[in-house]
C-alpha cells in the first residue's frame, strides 16, 4: 500500500512538471498563499529580489534629511536552540517570502498598472515601517526599492531597480 502511495505521489509530481496550468486567481485563494512558499526562484538562476529602504527626518518644512539605502533582509541568524523553538527565524522566512511574492506580483502586473493597489505592496510598506520603528522612532518618512540583484560568491555582479515607492509619510 505504501509503495502505491509513493508511486502515485511521484506521478502527480511528474504531471505537474509536464502539464502547464493556468494561473488561478481570486481573493480567497490570494489569502491562502501566505502558507506556501514562492517557488519561482527555481525557474532560473539569475537575479534575486532584494528589498532596500531608507528613512528620513523632516528638517524644515519641505526639507527631508535621508539616510542611506539599507538592505532589509528579514532572515535571522540561526542558533542551535532554534531546532526546538524558532518563532523569530520563522517570521523572517515569512517576511522574505513576502518579498518574493511582491516581486512575482510586480512581474505579473500589466504594463502601466499601479502597484500601490497590490496587497503585497501594502504589506511591504508595513514591513519597512516596522523595521525602521524597531531601529529608530524619530523618522517621519520612508521609501523602499525592490532591486533585482545578480550576485557571485565574491561580489555583486549586476543590480537594477524594479520599483521605487513614492515617499511615504509615517
Image (cartoon, rainbow, N blue to C red):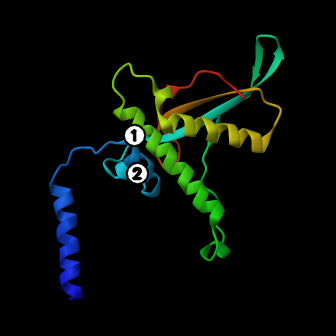
146 sits to left or right of 23: right
Q: Can residue 68 be seen in this view?
A: no
Give the x, y percent position of residue 62. 76, 10
112 sits to left or right of 53: left
Q: Distance between the residues labelled 1 and 2?
A: 8 Å
Helix, strand or loop status at disc 1: helix
Crowd around label 1: few <14 · some 14–19 · many ≥20 (10 Å): some
Residue 79 appears in which quarter of the rendering?
A: bottom right
Query: Considering the image in quadrants, where does the C terminus appear?
Result: top right
Residue located 32% across and 47% down the image: 44
Give the x, y percent position of residue 75. 60, 54
Residue at the disc numbered 2: 38
Crowd around label 2: few <14 · some 14–19 · many ≥20 (10 Å): some
Q: Which numbered disc covers residue 104?
A: 1
Residue located 64% across and 38% down the image: 128
**Contact (Cβ within 8 Å) of mark 1 with mark 2:** yes
Residue located 51% across and 43% down the image: 99
Chain-order first, disc 1 or disc 2: 2
Helix, strand or loop status at disc 2: loop
Residue located 20% across and 58% down the image: 16
Residue 92 appears in which quarter of the rendering?
A: bottom right
Q: Is residue 54 visible?
A: yes
Q: Which numbered disc covers residue 1?
A: none
Amino acid at each position: 500500500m505504501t509503495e502505491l502511495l509513493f508511486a502515485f505521489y511521484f506521478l502527480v509530481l511528474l504531471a505537474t512538471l509536464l502539464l502547464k496550468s493556468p494561473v488561478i486567481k481570486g481573493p480567497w485563494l490570494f489569502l491562502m498563499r501566505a502558507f506556501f512558499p514562492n517557488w519561482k526562484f527555481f525557474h532560473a538562476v539569475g537575479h534575486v529580489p532584494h528589498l532596500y529602504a531608507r528613512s528620513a527626518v523632516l528638517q524644515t518644512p519641505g526639507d527631508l534629511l535621508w539616510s542611506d539605502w539599507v538592505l532589509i533582509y528579514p532572515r535571522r541568524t540561526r542558533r542551535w536552540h532554534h531546532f526546538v523553538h524558532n518563532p523569530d527565524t520563522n517570521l523572517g522566512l515569512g517576511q522574505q517570502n513576502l518579498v518574493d511574492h511582491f516581486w512575482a506580483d510586480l512581474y505579473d502586473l500589466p504594463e502601466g498598472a499601479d502597484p500601490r493597489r497590490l496587497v503585497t505592496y501594502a504589506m511591504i510598506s508595513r514591513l519597512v515601517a516596522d523595521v525602521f520603528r524597531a531601529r529608530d522612532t524619530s523618522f517621519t518618512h520612508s521609501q523602499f526599492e525592490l532591486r533585482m540583484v545578480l550576485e557571485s560568491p565574491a561580489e555583486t555582479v549586476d543590480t537594477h531597480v524594479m520599483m521605487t515607492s513614492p515617499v511615504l509619510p509615517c
